[in-house]
Structure formats: structure tokens, C-alpha cells
Amino acid sequence: MTEIWGLTGGIATGKSTVSAWLRAADLPVIDADIIARQVVAPGSTGLAQIGTTFGADYLTADGLDRKKLGQLVFTHPEELARLEAITTPLIKAELQRQLADYQARQVPVVIIDAPTFFEVGYLIHLVDHVMVVATDVTTQRQRLMARDGLSAADAQARMDRQWPIDRKIAQATVVIDNGGTIAQTRQQVVKWLDANKFGKSNHLERGDQ
């Protein structure tokens, strides 16, 4: 039987780093962000539906004009809802297809990596457990400002589009505290892998590199 874990966090809390470590430990990871890009790739049904719904102005010769569409949905919640009505069913179907494939092969554990794991609603019903990568809110905001070159207000606005990290922590099976050094965070992941006998944690024993 396959054990299914959700992996999430807040923006700039370090989820992607933990996800990369889990891959390095040879755990299969289904990445919702990758699927989200695939379902609106050139030639896809999703891209055609976006063109029909929002107009050709949001398409380019290379496919979706992500920047222009992003600006629209960021400032207009009703437009975001229209976009999600197109993409969410497509993402869900592909994610479930990949999950069923792993289950059919009876792999011991599968990770579903999704930044908006709780926010989308349906993912919680697909998993047995949830891992949340967390920092305190001040650290999260500072890292986001430094990473994306944002003002404090803009960083907070992006954070506010997701559930507060404390709310996610309250629903987590396991919390990885990424408020310290990278080595301290890595050690928490190694401990979790070893305790559950998942993957190859020795692939992560690399000091502070």
C-alpha cells in the first residue's frame, strides 16, 4: 500500500528546498506547479480555453502571456476564479492520474508537492499525512522581499493570498522548521526519512553545502 504525503508551506518558507531533498532521497514527488504549467502549455486544451475565456490578448506566439494574465488575476479576484475554473479540473485530473500510476506500482510513499495544498481544497482528501515547511512570519516576509525584490507591503500582499502559516501548521502531521540554518532544516528531513524508513537519507548528509 502506498502512503501519500502532502508537502506544502507558505511562500518563501523553503518548501521547494525540502522538495528537492526528498527527490534526492529517491522519493517520488508529484509537483502541482509543474502540472499547472503543463495543462496550459502550447497546444493544450487549457490554453485554448483561456484564449476563449479571456481573449487572444492573453496569448502570444509562444503560448500563454503569464505576466499579463497574472497582473489581471492578481488584482481581480473574480478573474482569478474564472481562471481557476479552467485550470483546477485539468490539474486535478493529471495529478490523480500520476498518483494512480504510482499506486498501481505499489511504491511505498508518494509526495504531492503543492504550494496551495490547503487552499485548493481537494488535495487534503487525497493524502494520508501532511508535511508543512514553516518559518515565523517576519522571517518569511524578509525572505520574500529579498528573493523577489519586493517592498514589505507587496510581500505581505502575496503572503495574504495564502492561508496564514499558523493555520497550516495546525493541520500538519509533521512541521519542518526552516527558521534556522540550512543544515538544521536538512537534519529534520533526514530524521523524518529515517523514522519512516523512506528513501535514502544518506544522500542528504552533506554538511552545510
Image: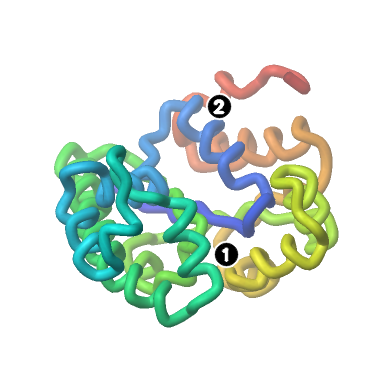
Taking the image as drawn, is residue 1 in sight?
no
* Residue 168 coordinates in the image, percent (x, y): 60, 68
Which residue is at 62% across, 39% downward? 189
Given the image, on which type of amino acid does mark 2 rest?
Ser
Q: Secondary structure at mark 1?
A: loop
* Residue matched to label 1: 172
Other residues around mark 2 within 10 Å, as few (<14) / some (14–19) / many (≥20): many
Q: How many marks?
A: 2
Applied colour scheme: rainbow
Q: Quadrant of the C terminus?
A: top right
Instruction: Give the side of residue 108 with respect to residue 196, left or right.
Output: left
Which residue is at 52% across, 62% downward? 71
Nearest the viewer among 41 and 169 is 41
Nearest the viewer among 112 and 141 is 141
Taking the image as drawn, is residue 163 in sight?
yes
* Residue matched to label 2: 201
